[in-house]
Image: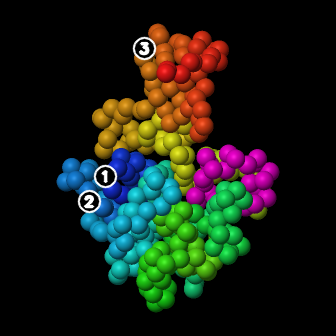
Amino acid sequence: MNEVSIALITDDNYVVPTIVTIASLLKSKKFRSQYDIYVLGHHLTPQNKSLLEKQGATVIECEPKLPKCSAANAHVSVAALLKFDLTNIFKKLDKILYLDTDMVILRDLSAFFNMDLGSHYAAVVKDMAGIKLEDCAGQIGHKNYFNSGMMLLNLKKMRADKISEKLLDYKLHKDRGHFMDQDCLNAVFRENVIYVSPVYNWMAPNQMRFDKKEIRKFYHLSKDLSLKNAVVVHLTNKQKAWDYADVWGHKLWKKYYKKSVLKHTKRCYQNEKKLFGWEKSIDTEIFRFMGVPLAKIQHAATKEKTYILGVRVKLKKRK
C-alpha cells in the first residue's frame, strides 16, 4: 500500500468545503493507495465533527498559538495559523501533505507524496498572480513566492530547524498583515523549497488574469493548463463555489458535493436565479419578474449605477 498522510484545517464556517475536498481525495485515489486524512478543527460543533468523521477523516481539535491575529483577507480564518504547528501536532511523522479546503483533487497523490524532499522544507507551486500582480515576492525581499494552499512538508527538517517557533516570531514581529500565513511561510522558508508543476496547485481563477502564452512561459510548460492535466484544482475565487452557482469551478465542486456525505442535503446558492424578487451578490442586485431581469443596481466603491429594463437611469436622492 502507498501510504499518504494528509492534513486539512477547518472551522465551522468551512466544514462543507472541507467535506467536499475529502470526498474528491477519496474518489480520485488509486486502489493501492492508503490515505490517512487528518482534519485540524478549530471550535467545531459535535455535529460538524461527526460529519467529517463520516467522510473518513480523523478530527483533531486544536487551538492556534496566536488566536487574536488578523489579515487583510477577511475570508481567511485564524485557524490557518495551525499550519505553523504541524511539526508539533504530528510529532511521529517526517512528512505530511497540507491542503487548503477550497480544493478539488482529480488524481491520485501517492507518487507526489513519495517524492524526495532532501534538505528542502517543502514542495510547493509558485503563485503567479502573487508574483506578477501583487509583488508579494518583492514585499518580503525574495525572487519567488509560493501559494501555501498546497505544501508537501518536510516535518523532520522543519522540526530540526525550529521552523514553528520562527513562523510564530515572524507573524508577531515582522508580518505585513496581508495574508494570515502565506507571507510568513515564504519568508521563513527562505526559498529553501522545491518548486513543482502547477498541476499540483492549479489556481485557475487567479490565472485567468493572464493569457495562455504568459502562463506557459512563467511555469516553463509545453502545453496549456487545463482540467485534463490538473491534479489539484484550487478554487481561489473570492466568490466561492459553495456559495455562488455561476463562478468558475462550481460544476466541478458540485460534482464532488454529490459524492460526499452531504449528497442528500440541498445546497442553496446566493445567486440562484429567482422567478420573482431581488437576488443579491457582492456588488450587484437584480430584480426579476418571471425570471426576466427588470432592474439592476450595480454597487461601486464610490457610487451606484441603476438600470431599469437595461437602461441606466439616475435616481434622485431623497432630501
Vertical placement of 75 versus 296: above or below?
below
Name the outermost residue toward the left: 46
Q: Which residues are magenta?
A: 198-219
Q: CA distance from mark 1 to mark 2?
A: 7 Å
Q: Residues within 10 Å of mark 1 (few under 14, many from 20)?
A: some
Q: Residues within 10 Å of mark 3 (few under 14, many from 20)?
A: few
Q: Are marks 1 and 3 in contact (CB under 8 Å)?
A: no
Q: Residue at horizontal 65%, vertical 69%?
A: 139
| Residue position for label 3 | 276
Residue 273 x/y as whole percent: 47, 22
- Viewer-nearest residue: 229 or 123: 123
| Residue position for label 1 | 12
Residue 214 x/y as whole percent: 78, 53
Give the mark, 2 or 3, whose residue is nearer the N terminus. Answer: 2
Q: Secondary structure at mark 2?
A: loop
- Viewer-nearest residue: 289 or 92: 289
Q: Are marks 1 and 2 in contact (CB under 8 Å)?
A: yes
Amino acid type, callout 1: Asp
- Horizontally, residue 252 falls left or right of residue 80, namely right
Amino acid type, callout 2: His
Give the mark, 1 or 2, whose residue is nearer the N terminus. Answer: 1
| Residue position for label 2 | 43
